[in-house]
Image (cartoon, rainbow, N blue to C red):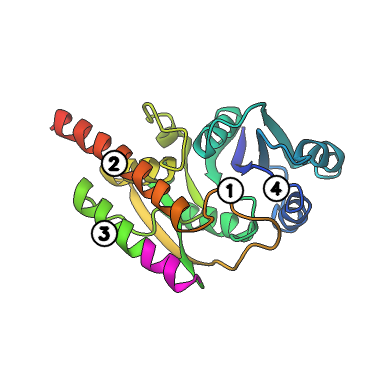
Amino acid sequence: MKKLSIVVPCYNESRNIPLILERFEKVVADDSVEVLLVNNGSTDGSAEVMNELLPNYPFARVVSVEVNQGYGYGILQGLAAANGESLAWTHADMQTDPFDVIKAWKIMQSEPDTSKTYVKGVRRGRAFFDEFFTIGMSGFESILLRARLWDINAQPNVFHRTFYETWQDPPSDFSLDLFVYYEAVRRGLTIRRFEVFFPGRIHGESSWNTGLRSKWKFIRRTIDFSLAMRKNLNHRG
């Protein structure tokens, strides 16, 4: 078993894949850490780039999803294939430095009980509109779910395998970030947050954050999922 498995969902990130592999090579100290690149149904040649480059990076391997079924689905496929005692995911767009995953893992290791610790970034350096959007969504989710939730979609996320094994019916879309964060709070895990710098993308465009219309669709999906979570919470209580 590895000490840490890092899942990186990749959807049409062919130009960023070489960069993220180069950066991980600098931060992965030994063979106790593995990086799983999930080719999440890409149509831009990402598979060919991975097949060409991965022989040069023995710490990395590919998990293939033939048809894209959502951001969360790709992450879940990567986690299912992971061998690590600790698990993590981060994005492939280089807006979160791969070193931040290692930093989060070290924060987790500093806690008395790593099995009951969840570490998540807090984004800095974002545009005003994006920050305003985060404030609104964080406030809404906190009130609805009666839990203090902030910067829900921040990366990276690091947690113990035993926490992952408790998940029931996790969502396959962008609501996965909310689901896992909320589950960590609900189950009483120690939540550790730390600042991560969040610059613009180096290559390509976001697959979802393309303007007001895409943000509204994201809000609607998140609200629907949140209401379902709230309903389940009422049934439990």
Rendered residue at 75%/58% (across/down) = 26
Q: Distance from label 4 to label 3 (Cα)? A: 32 Å
Secondary structure beneath disc 4? loop
x then y, percent, for residue 102: 59, 55
Say which mark, if any, is on residue 226. 2
Q: Residues within 10 Å of mark 2 (few under 14, many from 20)?
A: some
Counting residues from the N terminus, which is met first, the one under dot 4 or under dot 1? 4
Quadrant housing the C terminus:
top left
The residue where tag 1 is placed is 207
Rendered residue at 41%/60% (across/down) = 193
Q: Residues within 10 Å of mark 3 (few under 14, many from 20)?
A: some
Please give left or right for residue 45 compared with residue 66 in the image: right
Rendered residue at 38%/30% (across/down) = 167
Name the amino acid type tagged 3. Gly
Q: Which residues are magenta?
A: 126-133
Say which mark, if any, is on residue 139. 3
x then y, percent, for residue 112: 39, 51
Name the amino acid type tagged 1. Ser
Decide if residue 201 is in sight here: yes
Secondary structure beneath disc 1? loop
Mainly helix, strand or loop, the magenta region?
Answer: helix
Rendered residue at 35%/45% (across/down) = 220
Quadrant housing the N terminus:
top right
x then y, percent, for residue 126: 50, 70
- As displayed, is residue 43 above or below residue 193? above
Name the amino acid type tagged 4. Glu
